[in-house]
Amino acid sequence: MKSLLEKEIYQQPEVIKRLITNQSTEIAKLAETLRKNPPKFVLVTARGTSDHAAIYAKYLLSGINHIPSGMAMPSLYTLYRSVPDMSGGLVIAISQSGQTPDVRAVLDAAQNQGVPTISITNSKDSPIALAAEHKIILGADEEKSVAASKTFTSQLTALAMLAAHYSGDQERIAEINLLPDIIQSALEQRPVTEKIAERFSHTEHIAIVSRGFNYCTTFEIALKIKELSYMIAQPYSAADFRHGPIAMLETGFPVLAIAMRGSALSDMEDMIEAIHWTGADLTIMTNVDWLDQHAKDIIRLPEDLPDWLSPIACIVPGQLLGLHLSLARGLDPDKPRGLKKITLTY
């Protein structure tokens, strides 16, 4: 019998297709509204898995739309009650449930200062959705699994749509329509993720390394592994990995490197070479052929996958890896220890 998590992982091509169909016009209108009074900066507020979508948002909005973007610090708004001046900015709140109180606090403070706000949620009737000036509703249907899958890829897709429409780049807008088929291709990597899960099932630690757009992917894969298999999974930028953590590598140390075709590939090639010479047990997620010699296993994604959209595909084999690690370690992926679907932070 399939777990709830497995069922929802496999729903993602259809969920993303529906999101693109239902929300493209509304997101295009929202982008046009924002262009009339362009924000000087963007603050993104989120918690948990949505934090990793927020990292992706920073790269999109800063790199594609050239708007300085960063993360809000919700504890300043709640615990410290020291709210920064957000004048001239835009606040985006990302939340699957739309119920997290400290994310709502950032949104409320922005509203009080007359700052434009956008919510990205899966529930149109949630407090965060109702509080925002502009809304993007994911329409992913109820996500019953504790570990997020389809809501996360929906968040990333909504953000990509917003960035593309704000830029007005028709090529990027067209590339978004390829996502359902790309995600379907990513799901075909299930056999290799099962094999990797068996290999890593007896270890207690793993490092996940990438750079650029897929920095967010290292965090989300690490979270999936931690919450589903209870392993210590650490995410790293390849640049930061060189500044100390690489020293912990030794023969057999499990590493997953994400190296996709694009601006970060050359640096990731150098990083992979350095990891290889430590004797680490290296798995590579990639869409280029020439890295095969460095890894025991390759998670292969479509060669023509656009760099800026690659996190939406790369996370899917990561979700499968987390699922199969849980099963290989004799755990129930639908009942991760000490967790519940909605977590309220203040």
Image: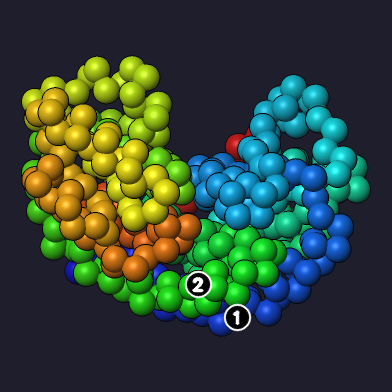
Query: Which one is nearer the viewer's eye here, 310 or 45?
Result: 310
Crowd band around label 1 with a 10 angstrom C-alpha radius: few (<14), some (14–19), many (20+):
some
Q: What percent of the width, then of the height, locates residue 170?
A: 60, 75
Residue 33 as seen in the image, left or right of residue 96 = right
**Nearer to us: label 2 or label 1:** 2
At a point 81% along the width and 30% down the height, the residue shown is: 84
Q: Amino acid at mark 2?
A: Ile
Residue under label 1, please give it.
22
140 w.r.t. 72: above or below: below
In 3D space, how far apart are the residues under numbered discs 2 and 1 (Cα atoms)?
13 Å
Residue 34 as seen in the image, left or right of residue 50 = right
Which quadrant holds residue 139?
A: bottom right
Residue under label 2, please give it.
176
At a point 27% along the width and 35% down the height, the residue shown is: 270
Q: What percent of the width, then of the height, locates residue 286?
A: 26, 54
Residue 32 as seen in the image, left or right of residue 197 = right
Rendered-image quadrant of the N terminus: bottom left
178 w.r.t. 98: above or below: below
Query: Which one is nearer the viewer's eye here, 2 or 257?
Result: 257
Q: Amino acid at mark 1?
A: Asn
Residue 311 seen in the current view: yes
Whether the residues at callouts 2 and 1 have beta carbons within 8 Å, the answer is no
At a point 14% along the width and 58% down the height, the residue shown is: 192
Rendered-image quadrant of the C terminus: top right
